[in-house]
Amino acid sequence: VSKLHILDPSRLTITKTKTPKPLSKPEDLVFGREFTDHMLAIEWNQEQGWMEPHITPYQNLSLDPATCVFHYAFECFEGMKAYKDKHGKIRLFRPDRNMARLNKSAARIALPTFEPTSLIQLISKLTNLDSRFIPDQKGYSLYLRPTLIGTQKTLGVGPPGSALLYVIASPVGPYYPTGFKAVSLEATDYAVRAWPGGVGDKKLGANYAPCIVPQLQAASRGYQQNLWLFGEEEYVTEVGTMNMFVAMKDRETGQRELITAPLDGTILEGVTRDSVLALARERLGPEGWKITERKFTMKEIYEASIEGRLLEAFGSGTAAIVSPVRTIAWKGKQVDCGLKENEESGEIALKIKAWMEAIQYGDEEHEWSVKL
Ligand code: PMP
């Protein structure tokens, strides 16, 4: 471990706010609009490595207009949640996964890496300090946003000599407050999100801005999300900002298969994706399901759909856990994803959501749920 990588939680200083914010009514929370009283910030520079961590009142940053983050997108981030269990204890869900992903993203854009356990300790301090913002009801949580930016003041294109790691926290409500609502997708055929050798498997801010126009175009035609395809084969990669799963039966054998795209560098390594795969292997495997990470094409989904073999399709991500899909618009066709008219979710998505929430809210003890 190099000196520059060491981040020391014992040097933490805490300055508490003198003006605590009033709490919003839980039902009024809008994703990512409100923030807690405090934030965590740690500066880094290439001479001294990580400086002492500070928890301070939530506040503006002050940066020179020439700071490299504004010009060359030296920015990566994470999205993770803290949950309150029925005893009022706060729990993080697989924080080690988010730390590992943040380090991979940082390393790819020449930003400093850090010891994962130290940052988890510091995030835990912030979360505990602001835990009053987490509503007690099931479905609510505290969305945590670790962010790492290059702060060197220079228009020269080069590795940032200084950086800032900060964490802000936003109380959020359930993605589907009144139960699942299956979404309709439009397959995007004129833009690609990621490509082999690119950075689509990293959580860089620069990956997100270019996704908005395809999303707006899909919305203008009445679709809630766009589906990202890749290549002439039209491999199905991700849906909006979620990983994509489909469940189908084999044409010849009738074997049921739950499929998601493999981590080939074009797919974000979703923590939810990994959790869905693990739970499905453990709990659906014994029921005869085959759980596979493999490439699959839009044509394969279309054929399964018209032959009545497509059982369901859903996205997976931290925000919604799973998001069921009703149809996919593709080449002028509406591909029906297996839901009955009065259904908002398939069986698998329902089961997975229940399994995940049981673990996240500590109703089922599991090593993925880390008590603070
Ligand atoms: N794909 C993309 C492009 C995303 O931005 C996200 C959200 N982080 C995901 C997938 C889902 O990842 P996770 O399950 O870790 O939230």
Image (tube, grey):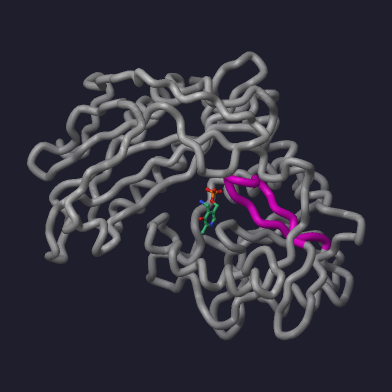
Q: Residue furthest top?
A: 87
Please report the residue visible at 44 percent of the width from the left and 60 percent of the height from the top.
Answer: 201
Q: Residue 149, position in %: x, y?
A: 28, 49
What secondary structure is the magenta-colored segment mainly?
strand
Q: Residue 154, position in %: x, y?
A: 12, 59
Q: In this view, does 329 lie to the left or right of 168?
A: right
Please report the residue visible at 58 percent of the width from the left and 37 percent of the height from the top.
Answer: 172
Task: Using the image as rendered, state which of residue 157 and residue 200 is in the foreground.
Answer: 157
Task: Using the image as rendered, state which of residue 312 and residue 183 is in the foreground.
Answer: 183
Give the vertical position of 336 relative to 267 (above or below): below
Please report the residue visible at 43 percent of the width from the left and 41 percent of the height from the top.
Answer: 145
Is 27 in the magenta? no
Name which quarter of the figure residue 198 lies in.
bottom left
Give the vertical position of 371 relative to 36 (above or below): above
Residue 367 appearing in the image: no
Q: Is residue 194 left or right of residue 27?
A: left
Name which quarter of the figure residue 297 lies in.
bottom right
Q: In this view, does 72 lie to the left or right of 124?
A: left
Is 314 in the magenta? yes
Q: Residue 284, position in %: x, y?
A: 77, 46
Residue 187 appearing in the image: yes
Task: Using the image as rendered, state which of residue 184 and residue 360 is in the foreground.
Answer: 184
| Segment colored magenta | 311-325
Query: Which quarter of the rendering shows the N terminus?
Result: top left
Name which quarter of the figure residue 315 lies in.
bottom right
Q: Residue 359, position in %: x, y?
A: 65, 30
Please report the residue visible at 54 percent of the width from the left and 46 percent of the height from the top.
Answer: 271
Q: In this view, does 149 lie to the left or right of 284?
A: left
